[in-house]
Image: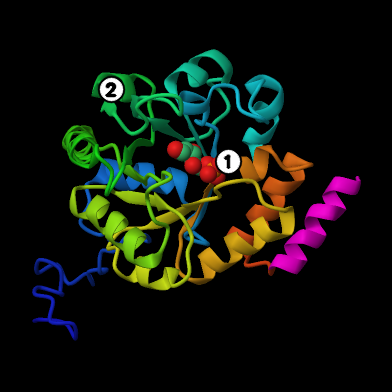
Amino acid sequence: MPDADGNKDASNYGLGIPVKKKSFFMKGLEYADWGIKERMARIFDKRSGNAVMLAFDHGYIMGPTSGLERIDLNVVPLLKYADCIMCTRGVLRSCIPPDCGKPVALRFSAGGTILGSLNYECVMDIEEAVRLDVSAMAVMVAIGSENEALTIRNLTKTADMGNRYGIPTFGVTAVGKNLARDARYLGLATRVCAENGATFVKTYYCEGFEKVVAGCPVPIVIAGGKKLPERDALELAYKAINDGANGVDMGRNIFQAEDPAAMIQAVRAVVHKGYSPDRAFELYNDIKSK
Ligand code: R5P
């Protein structure tokens, strides 16, 4: 007999045991493969549905930028507060303890730097992602840039490889001097990432962000962008979560904060517990003063 939702064979293959409707806690992933879901569940908290990803891959285009001069001193003490870490294979192998127990979103595309051909990238071999047991492969996609097609091809190729091995593809929408940051542009960029196989997408917060989320069939996390005063960065995270983001992939607003450990804990309170910006800023100051 069909059940109330019209599902066939609800009596469970004639055994009389009720069938539980299958579902996955993250948007757009109900029909994904087991390995993809298992890795997404490493990154995202099942209770809040959200994640605090700590991004420190900036060196691959910027070199030893402020707050990332010494990964061992600046970043390693923060690892325990992150749900997931995002970095390059070079930093992972040279600085991150393999027993830190954190899922890795590996920076999977690489190419030019801020001094040269930014956005002109290629992707790595899938064997490297398997060898490093990563939970996601992050690929930059520069919609509207002269390298647009190349970066979409990188994403597509990564999704092909990722699907073969059950590893999620993380589409990262690029920004550049000539790329807009409004809902129209980011809505297009995130949707293009999803359509071309991204399991989840990173983008920037903007006015009308709820429209960006609504138009993207897979989860979105936001980057923090340039360093803001701490309370403003907490407000940015709060608004993004409120407008439907599934978390943050934050770098500079954490590791360049006056107290990075206090900042990441305050961001956690917003992302997982829904703290208001004022309450989270109070928490930041409390931790900082101890
Ligand atoms: C940018 O290409 C990198 O992927 C960064 O990881 C990303 O921008 C997040 O860092 P931030 O919060 O500093 O913008």
What is the C-alpha distance between the residues marked 2 and 1? 23 Å
Local packing at callout 1 (Cα closer than 10 Å; few below 14, some 14-19, many 20+) is many
Q: Is mark 1 within 8 Å of ligand 1?
A: yes
Return the residue at label 1: 251
Q: Residue at x 17, y 34 (%)?
A: 157
Q: Nearer the viewer, residue 42 or 77?
A: 77
Q: Main secondary structure of the magenta part?
A: helix
Q: Amino acid at mark 1?
A: Gly
As for residue 289 lying within the magenta part, the answer is: yes
Residue 172 in the image: x percent, y percent? Answer: 37, 44
The residue at the point 86 percent across, 54 percent down is 286
* Viewport quadrant of the C terminus: top right
Q: Nearer the viewer, residue 79 or 38?
A: 79
Q: Is residue 29 visible?
A: no
User: Which portion, as a residue range, is magenta?
Assistant: 277-290
Q: Which residue is mark 2?
A: 124
Tell me if residue 225 can be seen: yes
- In the rendered image, the residue lying farthest to the right is 290
Q: Amino acid at mark 2?
A: Met
